[in-house]
Amino acid sequence: MDLKALTDSIVAMNDQVVRDLVKRALSDHIDPKVILDQGLIPGIKEVGSLFSRKEYFVPEVLLAAEAFYAGFDIIKPLLESAGVKKKGKIMIAVVEGDIHDIGKNIVKVMLEASGYDVNDLGRDVSVNRIIKSVKACKPQILALSSLMTTTMNHMEDVIKILEEEGIRSQVKVIVGGAPVNRDFAERIKADGYGCDAAEAVKITDTIING
């Protein structure tokens, strides 16, 4: 079976075809990791590239993400039972006061597609909950998103409290969102800034790989 058809179906946003192709690949005894690496991941990466080039927009990316998960959800239990190691542990959240989570959701699917274990805290997440979650789950990277100028300063609050609690050195913090830029990220002492989902994955890879 040619896994390029699976890749193309994600780009075409066709979740039913993706589901059928993954099932067919499994029935043909193709390893779930191969299905992920050679079929699903190339598809969502191409979608990310199209988004970066402004050939795809948010609605297309969300539909493509649904198509990706239609296949990924089938093989995920198989990957876990086979002991496939995740590349790293990421925690992601939209900061307090902000309910806009489309960008966060796109970053999440790109990170999962790239092999990361992503703990999604959701949207409008309080600073206190973020700190408690970091302490409990010990992610390697904390990814914070804000789409409002009125809420982006909560990112700085999180970093300051991580410092006060003596755990800042234990987690890298990356930030993103429409009003966020590199200068802001540097000012609040974040470890990285992503202008879009593809850039967020690149930064994550760089941090994890040292």
Image (cartoon, grey):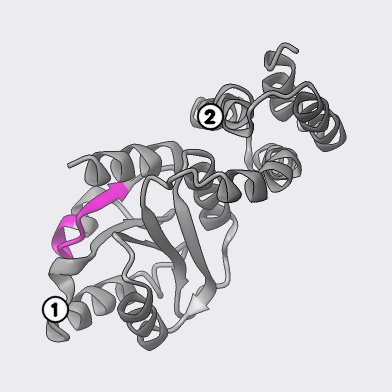
Please state the horizontal and vertical placement of residue 37, each as a whole percent of the image.
Answer: 54, 27
Q: How many other residues sit within 10 Å of disc 2, few (<14), some (14-19) or many (≥20)?
A: some
Looking at the rendered structure, the secondary structure element under dot 1 is helix
- Is 187 situated left or right of 153 in this image? left
Query: Which residues lie in the magenta part?
Result: 186-193
**CB atoms at circles 2 and 1 under 8 Å apart?**
no
- Is 81 situated left or right of 149 in this image? right
Please state the horizontal and vertical placement of residue 179, each as a whole percent of the image.
Answer: 38, 57
Please state the horizontal and vertical placement of residue 200, each as a whole percent of the image.
Answer: 38, 44
Front position in the image: 71 or 141: 71
Residue in the picture at 87% in, 36% down: 16
Residue in the picture at 63% in, 33% down: 32
Circle 1 residue: 163
Q: Which mark is residue 45?
A: 2
Q: Amino acid at mark 1?
A: Glu
Q: How many other residues sit within 10 Å of disc 1, few (<14), some (14-19) or many (≥20)?
A: few
